[in-house]
Amino acid sequence: MQHGLSFDIAHMLAGGLVLVSFMMLYQDRLYALLHVLALHALVLALAVAWQAHIQHAPHLYITAALALGFKAMLIPWALRRIVFRLGIHREIETVVGIGVTMLAGIGLVALSLEVMLPVTAHADPVSREDIALALSVVLIGLLIMVTRRNAVSQVVGFLSLENGVNLAATGAQGMPLVVEISVAFSILIAFIVIGIFLFRIRERFDTVDLQALDRFRGERPE
Amino acid sequence: MNELGVILVPLAAAALLSAIPGYRISARLNVLASLISLLFAISLLFDRPDSNQYLMVDDLNIVFILLNTFVGFTTSAFSASYIAHELETGRLTARYLRFYHAMFQLMLFGMNLALIANNIGLMWVAVELATLTTVVMVGIYRTHEAIEAAWKYFILGSVGIALALFGTILVYLAARPVIGEGMDAMVWTNLRAGAHAFDPALLNIAFIFLLLGYGTKVGLAPMHAWLPDAHAEGPTPISAVLSGLLLNVALYALLRFKILLADNTAAIAPGPLMIGLGLLSLIFAAFMLYRRRDIKRMFAYSSIEHMGIIVFSFGMAGPFGNFAGLLQMTMHSLTKSAIFFAVGHVAQVKGTQRIAEMGGLTETHPVLGWTLVAGVVAIAGLPPFGVFTSEFLVVSSTFAREPLLALLVVFGLLVSFGALLLRVTSVAFGEPRGPTGPVQASYLPIFAHLALVLIAGIWLPGPLVTWFLHVAAMLG
């Protein structure tokens, strides 16, 4: 019975992450999107902490703390400052309509469950559903990246994708080494994005909209 | 201990170079550090260390490590003559050069670590490190184009790398029931030993993710979009390293996992997937070569084409397919980096990378012009160069088994051949166009590469053939 409850909580948190991914899909304002990103990381932190508890793996608490401190607080805050300081358009331009994106998201979740559940039939039940849900988060992260035009919302898509991979890594029981390092690297990535690219892009352009960057392609006939 | 030298020397050099302000000293130190790494790599041939949980040296990765440190060394020598000019024209400042040299060594560290790692987690981290350092290097000129290229590379590269990590996690999940929990299930030598008992379905999905993830870094179509921009906009030494080395590192990661799948008879055969992506890249890139206006961009597409051939050949597998793939990879690394060295000097003389604004190079700069012609002849797969030998092997071994596929390969090769010759004639011959100032080039790295390719085209040493055949058998 004890086991049943702890599994249910693990699945609820992983499912919550998928749900928050869906919330990202229908945001049309950058600030709101950043709030959802913070929520996403918060749910991840809870999910990882719960895994640390049920797997008796104290080192996973470090991962959870990093997710809470960096991903849920520092990075959304820093992105918010960038948006504010650079005066980026507060509205998110999407490539396709929100309804279509949501439907595509549902399709992706169905796909990942369909693909992963039969395959992981022999794995232990915690990893099994966690991996399937983590794949959904990864795929929705990709969907966000391809359906958004602004650089900032693409970074948000990437960060949510990374969260999905982190969920998978912590869900795989006893996975060594990678947890800590992958978290360290996602921080590094975030720093590189924020520190170098956005500021550099700002130095040269008035917008962080990638379509504006397209104009400078070397291949266009002049 | 010598295996540590290959990774610790670049790391220490990176730390040292980040502290040295003068660019003349740091350029020389850069060359020296790369030379020491190369010597350590050569010593691996004679004194092979035992593998442990993190590092290992076997017949497969020693080919890659030697190639990596050798091209790293020649590139650092080329870079020393190249960047002085960039400083004069003001495209880079002394501060950026310091950064550049430190990053160069850090990148070599990442690549060597990825090649020597015996742990799929560590390998992933190393590939990510190499990617991040090259992203920063691509954007170093801070022009519109460079920033766009670096951004695109960063986004696509990170997505690829995230997918590869997901694949790595799935491999761990497949290995856990067989090998047991913890570090052991991430060690490649253990994985190899237990691969036959892994859950095939899990391994299949893992390989799809790894193929998409690392395949992005290999530059396979349709995930290649970052590659031409990154090659065209970064400093030329970085273009040479990207084409000659980084693509190989990602390919190496893919090959490691392919071996696992080959050992598991119930899993899907990785061959058809690799053949499909390889052919697609080859034919797509061959046609894309025709409409290129930028010379570095053109050779970037040529890299996609060659990676397509190489992946195709490894996909065909069997002793001949793998042998041809290995040879083609080695030849491509040497030739393509030599071409980029030459192109770098050409672009510096002409002050542009646009093909339309250069011409008559063999008249104004005979040595540089003819070197470039020789390089293009080599990469187009004409005898007597080594690329001819390897492409001939790819085609003939395919003909023996799948004549239809061989026809497609030949078609792709001919299409790209036409494009390359068309462009090189307009650059090398005809009326001189553009500035004709003197060139301060270091020809030694270019000549060294082309000489090796020429020798390989005429005569492959017996021990090398036996060694490559042995590796080919290992690749399954």
Image (cartoon, grey):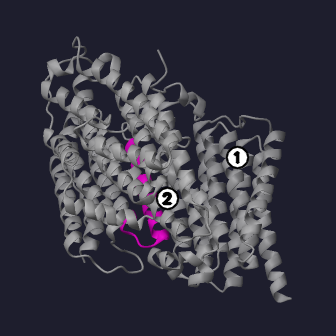
Q: Residue at x 18, y 58 (%)?
A: B35
Q: Earlier in the sequence, mark 1 or mark 2?
A: 1
Q: Which residues are magenta?
A: B114-139
- Is residue B226 inside the magenta stretch? no
Are the residues flagged by discs 1 and 2 in contact, CB closer than 8 Å? no
Q: On the picture, is A100 further left or further right than A205?
A: right
Q: Residue at x 28, y 32 (%)?
A: B376
Which circle marks residue A194 in the picture?
Answer: none
* For residue B410, above or below residue A49: above
Neighbours of disc 1 within 10 Å: few (<14), some (14-19), many (20+): many
- Is residue B117 inside the magenta stretch? yes
Mark 2 sits on what residue? A188
Q: Which residue is nearer to you in this view: A153 or B425?
A: B425
At label 1, the amino acid type is: Leu
The quadrant in which the N terminus of chain A is found is bottom right
* For residue B333, above or below residue A90: below
Give the SS element for disc 1: helix
Give the SS element for disc 2: helix
Mark 1 sits on what residue? A143
* For residue A215, above or below residue B119: above
Neighbours of disc 2 within 10 Å: few (<14), some (14-19), many (20+): some
| Quadrant in the picture for residue B87 | top left
| Quadrant in the picture for residue B292 | top left
* 3D distance between C-alphas at marks 1 and 2: 23 Å
Evaluate whether residue A102 shows in this view.
Answer: yes
